[in-house]
Amino acid sequence: METKQRILLCEDDESLGMLLREYLQAKGYDAELYLDGEAGSRAFMKSHYDMCVLDVMMPKKDGFTLAQEIRAISPEVPIIFLTAKNLKEDIFEGFKIGADDYLTKPFSMDELVFRMEAVLRRVKGVKVPVVSQYKLGKFIFDTQRQILSIGEKQVKLTTKESELLGLLCAHANDVLLRELALKTIWIDDNYFNARSMDVYITKLRKHLKDDPTIEINNVHGKGYKLIALDGVEATEQN
């Protein structure tokens, strides 16, 4: 069985950090979250990580200082900075320290994962698994072609329908947090995007109604749960 890539995630916004950790775990990474630079530094000294994702502005020790300490110990470990800053001098400072990439908030969680995958392929030659298909009940969901099929019936999903169903499948029989879905697909979790997501959930329910063993339930105050009585099987792209 392939070993999961271990990610050191340092983000002082606890809500965002927990969402990022959950999303990375759903994508197959072993992500550990620390809320300040000192805690992140202690964790790095004690363990091995395949990549570091560091917020720049953190209490006790900022991301740039932490990155310099990491580079002194392990010059080869990839580092991606997350920041609310978009000043060129801050970006230059990050790359001078040795950043492999730099992402400005707000950002799509999918974009972060794509950048992480690109860096891991480039730096470590890691082949990152991509789910090409989910089997849920009688349905086959082709993530690449964005097609949901049952028997001879096929439905071509929109991009957002496909992204949302993919998230639900990744969290099958568990709660998909509304905030996580909004920040992943719509980047912003404002009221209008939340209403838009509700519309897409309704559309997905209609698409899935042909199999009574599959349901999308509301979880009050939290989000949604894709119920798949027989579980969901993921097939990775070769």
Image (cartoon, rainbow, N blue to C red):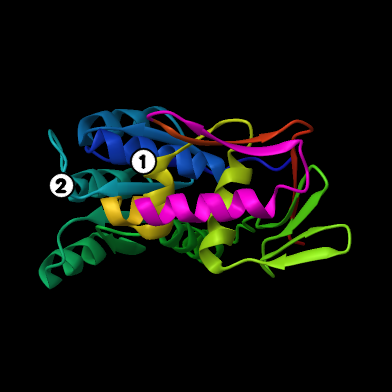
- Image height of 41 relative to 116, above or below: above
Q: Are marks 1 and 2 in contact (CB under 8 Å)?
A: no
Residue depicted at 34% across the width and 64% down the height: 101
Where does the image place residue 211, in percent across and percent down from the top left?
A: 78, 44
Q: Residues within 10 Å of mark 1 (few under 14, many from 20)?
A: many
In the image shown, does 68 or 224 lie closer to the viewer?
224
Mark nearer the N terminus (1 vs 2): 1
Label 1 sits on a secondary structure element that is strand
Quadrant where the N terminus sits is top right
x 14%, y 64%: residue: 90
> Crowding at label 2, few (<14), some or many (≥20) Cα neighbours within 10 Å?
some
Question: Which quarter of the rendered picture does the C terminus lie within?
Answer: bottom right
- Residue at the spot 57% in from the left edge and 68% down from the top edge: 158
Q: Is residue 221 above or below residue 17?
A: above
Q: Residue 146 is drawn in which quadrant? A: bottom right
**Extreme residue toward the right, this view:** 151
Percent position (x, y) of residue 50? 49, 46
Does 172 sit left or right of 218 as displayed?
A: right
Residue on which disc 1 sits: 9
Which residue position is annotated with label 2?
A: 57
